[in-house]
Amino acid sequence: MTSNVPTSVQTVQRAISLLRLIASSNTRDLRLIDLAEGSGLNKSTTHRLIQCLLEERMLTRGQNGRGYRLGPLLHEFGLAALPAKGIKEIAHMHLCKVAEMTGDMTFLVARSGFETICLDAIAGHFHVQTMTSGVGDRHPLGIGAGGQAILAALADSEIELVFDAIRHQLRNYSRFTRQSILHDVARCRSRGYSLDENMAADGISAMGKAICLPNKIPVAAVFIATLSSRMHQSRRSKLARHLHTCAAAIEFHMS
């Protein structure tokens, strides 16, 4: 590289070169020395770049803990870059069906790094609609029924990474703590759906279901939000079936 290239540009180019090396490797688990030699960088610089890429989830450690492979964030970027029909377009008619059958607001949120972003919101026919989230709203993973469902579908090791990343954001959500979120995750895994009762907003309850790729990676969630009086125990099983059918249909069209 020429000496007049800004340091920040050099850093980006060097990081990309490491990602390319791993992507082109047959084993996909390259060691520090392999990456340093393959990129022409010294070990110190390579190590600093690797640590940054690990923190940003662009790299992850291999199964033996000694090498490195491409991380989940790159997979998420790949999904966003696909030219095929996006998840919002795939999910829309299924969300409309749930809203029609239940009468309640139905939402689609997608995972974006350590957050969720609301992509779609469909109103039902019940006379009171609960707009707990608007299109474009972002929240840390674990907050709300959608974020809770996605978090529960992750491996425990990745949940720890999420908590490390969102610990400062949680200060803005006084009702939520690490312990309360982990408790909700355990209950979500046990019953097969998430449940947010009066946490996101007083008098409002929501139920969610994760949407996963064929390799079980959760990329989104669908959830129903309604008055807590309508989320009574006798109705939950019916709503859960609607969510399961909706999520399964979206997953089928994404596969």
Image: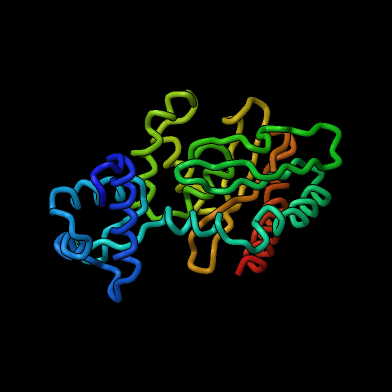
Front position in the image: 105 or 64: 64
Q: Residue at x 13, y 53 (%)?
A: 43
Taking 203 as reference, is 99 left or right?
right
Q: Is residue 160 visible?
A: no
Front position in the image: 66 or 232: 66
Q: In x, y percent, where is residue 215?
A: 48, 67
How many marks on residues? 0
Q: In x, y percent, where is residue 39?
A: 22, 61
Q: Is residue 148 above or below residue 173?
A: below
Which quadrant of the structure image shows residue 242?
Answer: bottom right
Q: In x, y percent, where is residue 66?
A: 18, 62
Q: What is the quadrant of the C terminus in the image?
A: bottom right
Q: Is residue 202 above or below residue 59?
A: above
Q: In x, y percent, where is residue 200?
A: 59, 30
Front position in the image: 140 or 205: 140
Q: Residue at x 63, y 37 (%)?
A: 136
